[in-house]
Amino acid sequence: MGIVTWVLAGPLLAWLNRRGRPERLSALEGRTLAVGPPHGAPLKFRVEKGRVRAAPLHARADMTVRARPSTYLAILRGRLDPDAAFFQRRIELDGSLRVALVAKNVFDGLLA
């Protein structure tokens, strides 16, 4: 895992736990998700007991999202719709499409 990922991991997990209500996050209970750049090691996290926690490096992700940092920032700032980014191929998804759709619904609620 790169230094940038380590630097961003703490604030990202803290933000997710502040914004996420346990009842919303429960839809992802026991799932491991990975978020990262197009190339390189992603940040892996897991939802356990209504909280988002860092997952071990060796954990197998149920779903991985990859995009350029500028794409993530545009989505977080509300300048780019995640669906539009996906259909413009600015976001790559690997793994379970079902988990990806559940995660999208949970995180759409966090960004609202």
Image (cartoon, rainbow, N blue to C red):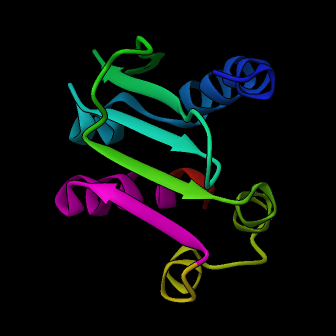
Q: Is residue 1 above or below residue 82?
A: above
Q: In this view, does 83 lie to the left or right of 36?
A: left
Residue 92 horizontal/vertical position (percent): 48, 66
Quarter of the figure that contains the N terminus: top right
The image shows a total of numbered marks equal to: 0
Instruction: Answer whether residue 105 is magenta in the image.
Output: yes
Quarter of the figure that contains the C terminus: bottom right
Residue 36 horizontal/vertical position (percent): 59, 44
Q: In this view, does 53 lie to the left or right of 60?
A: right
Q: Depth check: give the residue in front, 88 or 29.
A: 88
Residue 80 horizontal/vertical position (percent): 71, 78
Residue 35 horizontal/vertical position (percent): 53, 43
Q: Which residue lies furthest to the front in this view?
A: 39
Magenta residue span: 90-109
- What residue is shown at x 20% (from left), y 25% (from top)? 30
Instruction: Answer whether residue 25 is magenta in the image.
Output: no
Q: Is residue 9 above or below residue 95?
A: above
Q: In this view, does 105 lie above or below 62?
A: below
- What residue is shown at x 78% (from left), y 77% (from top)? 79
Please tell me in which quadrant of the rendered image residue 25 appears: top left
Please tell me in which quadrant of the rendered image residue 98 appears: bottom left
- What residue is shown at x 75% (from left), y 71% (from top)? 78
* Secondary structure, magenta segment, majority class: helix
